[in-house]
Image (cartoon, rainbow, N blue to C red):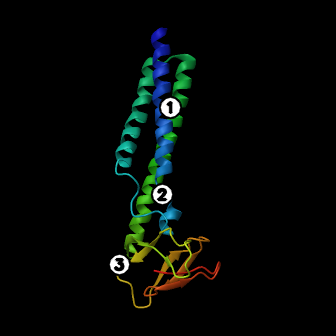
Amino acid sequence: MASVEASLLINFILNGIIFTVGIIVALLIPSNRKIREGEAGTSLGAPWIILVLILMLIMTIALFPVSFLFQKGANLVLALVLDLIALIITSTAVIIYLGARRAYRELREEGYEHVEMVRAVPTDGGHALSHPSEHLHPADPPPGNLITVECPQCGSHLHIPENSHTITCPYCGLTGSI
C-alpha cells in the first residue's frame, strides 16, 4: 500500500511540474496578434522552449502507462485525471508554439524579414520620447512605403513615410525626430 501512495505522490509531483512549466512556457511564447502587429520581436522566445516542449510531451505521454502500472482504484482515477490535465496543458503550449511559428513564417512570406528598432528623439525639449518601439520593416520596400512607429507618450501606432525624420502624434501632439 505504501508503494501505491508513494507512486501517486510522485505522479502528483511530476504532473505539478508539467502544469507549472507548461503554463510558464505558454506565457513566454508571443501571441499571433502581437506577432502580426509587430509587438513581439523577431523570435519565439528563448531557444530552449522547443526542448522544454519536447520533454513535456515525453513526460506527459510516459505518465499514462506508469499510472496504469502502479495505481489502483480511486488512486488510478486521480492519477489519470492529473495525467489528462497535464496532456491538455502540454498540447495547448505546443499549439501556441506552432501558431506563433506559423505567424512568423507568414510574415516572412509577406516580405517582412526583421524587426527594426526606432527611437524617437524629442525636438521640443521634452523627455517623453525615450522608449523605443518595435515595428515590422519590409525587406524591399517600394518608394513611399509607410512604417509604423508607436508614440511613447500615448501608445498610438502612427503610420509615417519611411524617409520621415520628424513625427507629430495627431492624438497627443507630441513632436519628435527619428
Residue displayed at 40% across by 40% down: 57
Residue 147, x across and y down, in percent: 47, 80
Q: Relative to 26, does residue 132 appear above or below in the rendering?
A: below
Give amino acid for label 3: Ala
Q: Residue furthest top?
A: 1
Q: Earlier in the sequence, mark 3 or mark 2?
A: 2
Residue placed under numbered mark 1 in the picture:
16
| 172 horizontally vs 34: left or right | right
Residue placed under numbered mark 3 in the picture:
139
Q: CA distance from mark 3 to mark 2?
A: 22 Å
The quadrant holding residue 73 is: top right
Q: Earlier in the sequence, mark 3 or mark 1?
A: 1
Q: Residues within 10 Å of mark 1 (few under 14, many from 20)?
A: some
Circle 2 SS class: loop
Give amino acid for label 1: Gly
Circle 3 SS class: loop
Q: Residue furthest front?
A: 125
Q: Earlier in the sequence, mark 2 or mark 1?
A: 1
Q: Residue furthest bottom?
A: 143
Circle 1 SS class: helix
Give amino acid for label 2: Pro
Marker disc for residue 43: none
Quarter placement of the C terminus:
bottom left
Residue 25, x across and y down, in percent: 46, 46
- How many marks on residues? 3
Q: Residues within 10 Å of mark 3 (few under 14, many from 20)?
A: few
Circles 2 and 1 in contact, beta carbons < 8 Å? no
Looking at this view, is 175 or 95 the one in front? Answer: 175
Marker disc for residue 30: 2
